[in-house]
Image: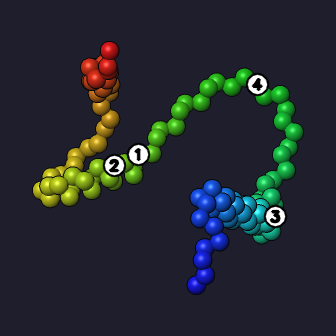
Amino acid sequence: MGHPVTTNPFIIMLINMTIVFAVLMGLSAMIRLIHLCDPTAKAKEEKKPAAAPKAAAPAAAPAAAPKADNSAVIAVIAAAVAAYDSEARIVTVRPIESSVWKNNARAVALNNTVC
């Protein structure tokens, strides 16, 4: 092996940064090329129905907020209880309307502030 071309750290830094940015620009070009050749883009456009012109809609009453689906949260809670204690039985899971946690967090935050 021969001697190194340079020992100047700034030249080495410039060479390394040039290589890194060249690779990043190459990846960016590949991503743009993939977006241009995307075969699923046409399928997405075809699925969109033509929007009919909307007539003046009467003022509608605000719709009731849909009930949140908490089945995943309930499943995680049930699994945690079952893993902790195999004899426990979950009867019901319901949210507790309480501001105790919020107030406690505020008090802790106020106590931890540096004056």
- Answer with left or right where residue 88 lies relative to residue 110: left
Q: Quadrant of the C terminus?
A: top left
Q: Amino acid at mark 4?
A: Pro
Tell me how many marks there are: 4
**From the viewer's perspective, is the residue at label 1 or at label 3 nearer?**
3
Characterize the local packing of mark 4: few (<14), some (14-19) or many (20 or more) Cα atoms within 10 angstroms. few
Q: Position of residue 91 (x, y in %)?
A: 22, 46
Q: Amino acid at mark 3?
A: Leu
**CB atoms of marks 3 and 4 within 8 Å:** no
Q: Residue at 20%, 58% (x, y): give it.
A: 83
Q: Residue at 81%, 64% (x, y): give it.
A: 36
Q: Which mark is residue 36?
A: 3
Q: Position of residue 1 (x, y in %)?
A: 58, 84
Residue found farthest to the top: 115
Q: Which mark is residue 100?
A: none
Closer to the camera, 98 or 66?
A: 98
| Residue 62, placed above or below residue 54 | above
- Answer with left or right where residue 14 lies relative to residue 99: right
| Residue 52, placed above or below residue 1 | above
Q: Estimate the spatial distance between the alpha carbons at disc 3 and disc 4, rounded to whole Å.
A: 42 Å
Q: Estimate the spatial distance between the alpha carbons at disc 4 and disc 2, rounded to whole Å.
A: 40 Å
Q: Amino acid at mark 1?
A: Asn
| Residue 37, placed above or below residue 78 | below
Q: Position of residue 14 (x, y in %)?
A: 67, 58
Whichever of callouts 3 and 2 sits on the residue coming sooner in the sequence is 3
Characterize the local packing of mark 2: few (<14), some (14-19) or many (20 or more) Cα atoms within 10 angstroms. some
Q: Amino acid at mark 2?
A: Ile
The answer to whether residue 16 of the structure is visible from this angle is no
**From the viewer's perspective, is the residue at label 1 or at label 4 nearer?**
1
Q: Which residue is mark 1?
A: 70
**CB atoms of marks 4 and 2 within 8 Å:** no
Closer to the camera, 12 or 79?
A: 12
